[in-house]
Amino acid sequence: MEKVVYFSYTPEQIVKSWVANLATPPVSDDTRAMDAVAAGQCDITVVNTYYFGGLMKKKSNLPLAIFWPNQNTKGSGVHVNISGAGITRHAKHQAEAVKFLEWLSSEKARLALINILFQR
């Protein structure tokens, strides 16, 4: 049986503690956040993996790595973006839309999107 741990902190208290512990002022985008870690201004940041992939393609020697929390058989895992597509009932070009979605779900398109967007 998995042990459940409850904390007596409110979300507001937790976020306030994070803000009080910031190593640098917040930055406006993921790439700048990773640059701050690489420059030693802070130890960790939270970013979208596709920005990590794009930055590493440009600057492959940066001392950065992705950490996936709770990746064990009993862990809760991590957030995953899920994308979906559909065709509305009244679409004017349904046959073309079907062909486009079929292409998007093909191996060729999937690999192209991974290489462009760094998303899996």
Image (cartoon, rainbow, N blue to C red):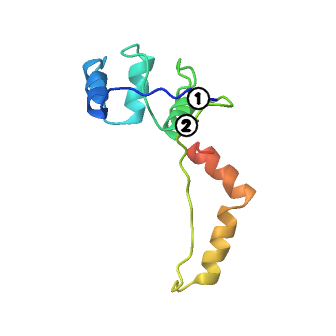
Classed neighbour count for the residue bearing mark 2: other residues with Cα under 10 Å, few (<14), some (14–19), many (≥20) = few
Q: Name the residue located 25 percent from the left edge and 26 percent from the top edge.
A: 16
Tell me the kind of residue under disc 2.
Val
Where is residue 25 drawn, in percent x and y?
26, 24
Of residue 36 and residue 78, the one placed in the foreground of this image is 78
Q: Which numbered disc covers residue 78? A: 2
> Would you say 120 lies left or right of 13 here?
right
Q: Which numbered disc covers residue 110? A: none
Residue 26 appearing in the image: no
> Would you say 80 lies left or right of 30 here?
right
CB atoms of marks 2 and 1 within 8 Å? yes
Residue 109 appearing in the image: yes
Where is residue 17 drawn, in percent x and y?
28, 22
Q: Name the residue located 52 percent from the left edge and 33 percent from the top edge.
A: 52
Q: Name the residue located 68 percent from the left edge and 54 percent from the top edge.
A: 110
Q: Name the residue carrying label 1.
A: 70
